[in-house]
Amino acid sequence: MGIHKYFRSLNELERIIRCPGKFKFEEHSVAAHSWKVVQYAKTLADIEEKNGAIIDWKKLYEITSSHDYGEIFIGDIKTPVKHSSIQLRLLIQQVEEGMVNHFIEEHIPEEFKSIFYNQLREGKDDSVEGLILEVADKMDQVYEAFAELQRGNTEKEFVVMYRNALIKIKNIDLKCVEYFLEQVLPDMVNEETISSIDIKRITEEALAL
């Protein structure tokens, strides 16, 4: 089947819904999430560049656009479950990587295999690009959870998602994180809301930890 099999498989990302099993005012597919992560990441990288960082843009686009490709095989596992223990998180990652590698071995032509192994690998690491991916990924959790809370969704999982994503972001040492927390987040929190949940208080508590 060759690379055609890979191109066809991308349609499946449009049918995988994030945060399954919970009431949501808006459904978000993994494909939409991946697109948004790329948009966040390129702006975050611009901020880093303005502050003297050297960005490998090719690597950045590769890892951000493909970071959730493995969910084609395992679906979107709820964040609280995925991160309930380090052992479980590592096991899920091993299964996902194994299935991606098996797909490449089975369907990708030999001359492109090394490229696909590189592009579809786990991109979150200690490099500036890997850290930007981590921030961008968590930013989308913040925005998705905030949108639900803002509209009055009282599902506890969105409070937990919003809070934990903010905590993760603030602990990443990048200039773009400082910019997000100081310039972007206040605009978000000050938007009009019909929620009975005190989003501003949750935000302040998360940033104080």
Image (cartoon, rainbow, N blue to C red):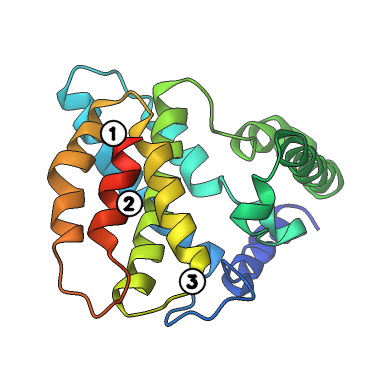
The mark nearer the N terminus, 3 or 1, is: 3
Q: Nearer the viewer, residue 167 or 172?
A: 167
How many callouts does the rendering have? Answer: 3
Where does label 3 land, which residue?
28
Give the residue drawn at x 81%, y 47%: 99
Q: Classify mark 3: residues with Cα within 10 Å, few (<14), some (14-19) or many (20+).
A: some
Image quadrant where one finds the N terminus = bottom right
The answer to whether residue 52 of the structure is visible from this angle is yes
Of 72 and 77, the residue lying toward us: 77
Could you tell me if the residues under marks 2 and 3 are in contact, i.e. CB atoms within 8 Å? no
Residue 187 is situated, as x and y percent measured from the top left of the image, at 13, 56
Q: Position of residue 115 (x, y in %)?
A: 64, 33
**Which badge, 2 or 3, comes first in the chain's sequence?**
3
- In percent of width and height, residue 108 lies at 76, 45
Residue 208 % position (x, y)? 29, 37
Residue at 38 percent of width and 28 percent of height: 172
Q: Give neighbour class at mark 2: few <14, some 14-19, many 20+ (Cα, 10 Å).
A: some
SS of the residue under disc 3: loop
Q: Which residue is mark 2?
A: 39
Side (left or right) of 152 relative to 8: left
Q: CA distance from mark 1 to mark 2?
A: 10 Å
Name which quarter of the figure residue 55 lies in.
Answer: top left
Give me the C-alpha separation between circle 3 and circle 1: 24 Å
Give residue 45's mark.
1
Of the residues shown, which amino acid type is indicated by label 1? Ala
Q: Secondary structure at mark 1?
A: helix
Q: How crowded is the residue under tag 1: few (<14 C-alpha within 10 Å), some, or many (20+)?
A: many
- Mark whose residue sits in front, 2 or 3: 3
Seen at 82% across and 40% down, the residue is 98
Answer with left or right where residue 173 lies relative to residue 189: right
- Is residue 135 something one can see in this rendering? no
Hey, what amino acid is under mark 3? His
